[in-house]
Image (cartoon, helix red, strand yellow):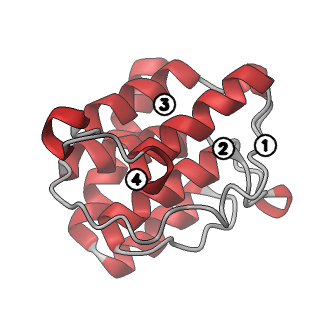
């Protein structure tokens, strides 16, 4: 599992801010009942606790947030950025890792449900291509571009 000093929380917060529709659009912030609000809250909790483990994080992803209207490219780009942060833990993959919890919440927005993740970004992108090739291509391109910028 990724350690606290390996994670880029600022990037996660920035990506979530780009996706959030703001209380001005929603009327008020639904916090933990909103997929983005939930993601922001668990990220903040991890920042305060200096951990990457979210107790019951995966189990508590709000499945009923059906606001819609999120910017697809911002969501897919955020998924790509999270995949880049993933350490490819494979068999050590933890469902309640912050990266997994936030990515899973974004998957609910983009695909209607969480997608199985086995701890490997490349295998994940192939799997997503089988679900939606266009979205997988956007994720792949952003992942590679992000990798190029950060290396």
- Depth order, front residue of 147/63: 63
Image height of 81 relative to 8, above or below: below
Q: Residue at x 27, y 31 (%)?
A: 18
Residue designated by label 4: 34
Residue 112 visible somewhere in the drawing: yes
* Residue 121, position as x, y percentages in the image: 56, 55
SS state under label 3: helix
10 Å neighbourhood of mark 4: few (<14), some, or many (≥20)?
A: many
Along the polypeptide, which appears first: circle 4 or circle 1? Answer: 4
Image-quadrant location for residue 1: top right
Distance from label 2 to label 1 (Cα)?
6 Å
* Residue 151, position as x, y percentages in the image: 51, 19
Along the polypeptide, which appears first: circle 3 or circle 2? Answer: 3
SS state under label 1: loop
10 Å neighbourhood of mark 3: few (<14), some, or many (≥20)?
A: many
Q: Residue at x 78, y 57 (%)?
A: 94
Distance from label 3 to label 4 (Cα)?
16 Å
Q: Residue at x 21, y 66 (%)?
A: 134
Residue designated by label 3: 12
Image height of 67 relative to 26, above or below: below
Residue designated by label 1: 53
Determine contact: label 4, label 2, CB under 8 Å: no
Along the polypeptide, which appears first: circle 3 or circle 1? Answer: 3
Image height of 68 relative to 55, above or below: below
Q: Would residue 67 appear left or right of 83 to someone viewing this image?
A: left
Determine contact: label 2, label 1, CB under 8 Å: yes
Q: Would residue 88 appear left or right of 126 to someone viewing this image?
A: right
Q: Which mark is residue 98?
A: 2
């Amino acid at each position: 599992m990724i350690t606290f000093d390996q994670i880029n929380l600022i990037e996660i917060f920035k990506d979530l801010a780009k996706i959030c529709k703001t209380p001005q659009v929603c009327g008020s912030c639904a916090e933990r009942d909103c997929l983005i609000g939930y993601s922001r809250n668990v990220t903040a909790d991890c920042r305060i606790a200096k951990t990457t483990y979210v107790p019951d994080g995966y189990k508590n992803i709000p499945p009923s947030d059906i606001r819609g209207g999120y910017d697809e490219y911002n969501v897919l780009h955020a998924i790509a950025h999270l995949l880049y942060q993933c350490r490819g833990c494979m068999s050590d993959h933890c469902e309640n890792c912050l990266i997994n919890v936030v990515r899973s919440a974004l998957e609910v927005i983009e695909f209607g449900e969480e997608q199985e993740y086995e701890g490997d970004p490349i295998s994940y992108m192939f799997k997503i291509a089988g679900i939606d090739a266009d979205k997988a291509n956007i994720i792949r391109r952003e992942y590679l571009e992000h990798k190029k910028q950060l290396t």
